[in-house]
Image (cartoon, rainbow, N blue to C red):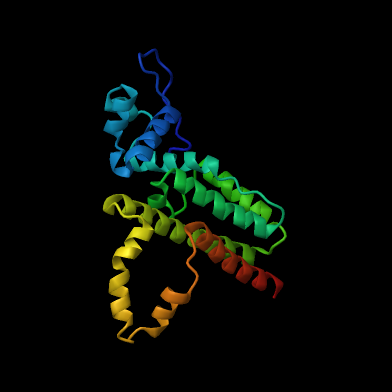
Amino acid sequence: MLVWERPEPPERPAPAPLSRERIVRAAIRLADADGLDAVSLRKVAAVLGVGPMRLYGYIATKEELLDLMVDAVHVEIRPTGDGWREVLRSLAEATRQAAHRHEWLADLLGGRPRLGPATLAAGEAVVAGLGGVDLATVVPAVAAVNAYVVGAVRREITERRAERASGLDQAQWQAAFGPYLERTFATGRFPALASVVRDGPHLDADQTFRAGLDFLLDGIEARIRG
């Protein structure tokens, strides 16, 4: 029986009452502070002031705990809007914002879908919002938006982590490697790249995300109209 359907143990008097919600919230606090490496049933039990064995009545494995954590965060992802384009934009923006609040989410997005109630509710909101579009378009369109968001968010979170690890923000990193690029471009071997670096637009993360999303939505719109 999946964790979503398996009943919790009956309540019992204890110095530290437990529930799946308490366990998941404690795990999310650990992950928000120190990443997924900080999350284990032992560490969660310590935060809650109980022995690790007590948690196994509620959660059988760490994988179940991760599934519950992702589902809990999906409460923050509620796509809204008038028309399919705004619904898909809302899905993309809400997922990105949730990942920025919970960096560890970027490591768990993608792959097989998690089937918790909050995740299913988010999916229901998206599909319902695309009610005027045929399913042959809805399915690949939603998949394309999700794939774009996963890639974009992982790139952004990787940049954040690189800044923390190196002590250099993006501008400082570019300044450090600028002389090397100028020497390389001076050889004339990479004229197209040199043009991009010297003359192309230099967008920030928000602008880059929204421009790429617009390109994708424009393509979906062309398919729907066609």
- Residue 75 seen in render: yes
- Residue 1 seen in render: no
Q: Is residue 198 above or below residue 37?
A: below
Residue 7 image point, x, y percent: 46, 30
Residue 172 image point, x, y percent: 34, 59
Q: Tell me which corner region of the image, top left, top right, bottom left or bottom right, holds residue 130.
A: bottom right
Residue 210 image point, x, y percent: 56, 61
> Which image quarter holds the C terminus?
bottom right
Which residue is drawn at the image coordinates 45% and 34% (left, top)?
6
Residue ranking furthest to the bottom? 188
Between 95 and 64, the residue placed more toward the observer is: 95
Q: Is residue 148 above or below residue 105?
A: below
> Which image quarter holds the N terminus?
top left
Between 169 and 158, the residue placed more toward the observer is: 169
Residue 74 image point, x, y percent: 51, 43
Which residue is drawn at the image coordinates 47% and 58% (left, top)?
205
Count numbered badges in the picture: 0
The answer to whether residue 87 is left or right of residue 8 is: right
Q: Tell me which corner region of the image, top left, top right, bottom left or bottom right, holds residue 48.
A: top left
Which residue is drawn at the image coordinates 43% and 80% (left, top)?
195
